[in-house]
């Protein structure tokens, strides 16, 4: 997720850099038009303001990507002063999972290790409670003996002895019963915790799946917006050169184009992160299998 975030920031820097170049060209154009008497001072001031705004956006984006670089470097275990950059040059959708959410929920219930740990804890508590009942199990002793002597003309006689002692547990059973009740309550609490954790996982899977679907729809809408805003900018420039529209129309069209491009990068990133989160929530990926084979150098 941090990689996707860094990639988004990288794309945004490129967008704002291009916007800065365009704003500078628009500013130069308005000054030239004003000099030859076909433009207004208002257009010059407005273009200058937009140029200053574009510089601020670029500086902010550059600062943001530097922070994202440090975060990713820290997670990777490398020097955070190293400016790392994504290998990808553009943000594209990463469709990692396409499965009914009901199947994902059921898979999560069987594969999540945190749920399995809760189940084993309940089994251990039940075993501990069963052990307490052994204090009431009676002790049975069996003995077999022969007596008499053949020398005295008597045949040996046999004796069978069976003794049973029934313990009453600690404090005549009262202490043991108290412990049994306490363990029973612990088991009930653990079972409730397991039920709640299962419900939380179900909620997280459904939420991540819905976020993924929502982001996917926004991506498609953003693509349309980017295309339309680009065409709008081209038309506004042509109309201004023909004297039909004003420079204000160009400025507004340029702003729409930049915002739509940033929005597209944001929505694609949200979709990719939601896909990764869905894999994690459903138990398909985990800390263990992600780090499997990973050796971090000291």
Image: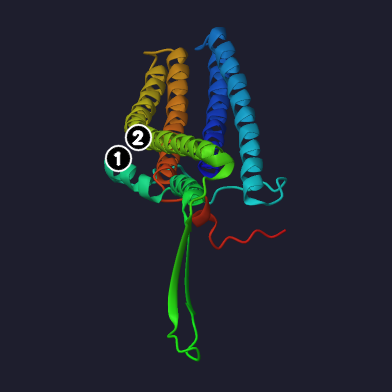
Locate residue 199 relative to residue 66 in the image: left or right: left
Which residue is most to the front?
152
| Residue 286 in view of the camera | no
At mark 2, the secondary structure is helix
Residue at position x 42%, y 38% from top?
191
Compare residues 244 and 205 and report the one nearer the observer: 205
| Residue 79 in view of the camera | yes
Residue tagged 1? 101
Residue 172: percent from left, percent from top: 55, 41
Task: Classify 10 Å Cα crowding around label 2: few (below 14), some (14-19), many (20 and above).
Answer: some
Where residue 246 sits, quadrant-wise, is top left
Disc assigned to residue 206 = 2
Residue 298: percent from left, percent from top: 72, 58
Residue at position x 38%, y 29% from top?
230
Residue 220: percent from left, percent from top: 32, 33
Compare residues 204 and 141 and report the one nearer the observer: 141
């Amino acid at each position: 997720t941090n990689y996707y975030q860094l990639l988004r920031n990288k794309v945004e820097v490129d967008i704002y850099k291009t916007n800065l170049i365009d704003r500078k060209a628009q500013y130069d154009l308005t000054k030239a038009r004003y000099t030859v008497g076909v433009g207004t001072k208002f257009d010059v001031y407005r273009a200058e303001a937009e140029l200053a705004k574009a510089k601020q956006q670029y500086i902010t984006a550059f600062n943001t990507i530097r922070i994202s670089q440090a975060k990713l470097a820290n997670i990777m275990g490398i020097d955070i002063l190293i400016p790392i950059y994504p290998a990808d040059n553009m943000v594209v959708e990463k469709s990692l999972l396409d499965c009914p959410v009901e199947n994902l929920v059921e898979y999560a219930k069987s594969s999540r290790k945190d749920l399995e740990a809760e189940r084993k804890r309940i089994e251990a508590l039940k075993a501990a409670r069963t052990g307490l009942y052994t204090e009431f199990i009676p002790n049975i002793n069996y003995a077999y003996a022969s007596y008499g002597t053949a020398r005295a003309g008597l045949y040996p006689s046999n004796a069978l002895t069976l003794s049973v002692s029934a313990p009453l547990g600690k404090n005549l059973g009262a202490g043991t019963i108290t412990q049994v009740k306490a363990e029973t309550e612990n088991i009930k609490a653990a079972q409730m915790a397991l039920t709640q954790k299962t419900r939380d996982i179900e909620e997280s899977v459904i939420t991540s799946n819905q976020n993924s679907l929502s982001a996917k729809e926004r991506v498609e809408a953003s693509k349309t917006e980017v295309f339309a805003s680009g065409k709008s900018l081209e038309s506004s420039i042509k109309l201004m050169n023909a004297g039909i529209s004003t420079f204000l129309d160009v400025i507004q069209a340029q702003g729409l184009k930049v915002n739509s491009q940033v929005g597209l990068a944001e929505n694609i990133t949200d979709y990719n992160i939601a896909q990764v989160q869905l894999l994690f929530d459903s138990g398909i990926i985990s800390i263990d299998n992600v780090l499997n084979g990973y050796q971090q150098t000291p």
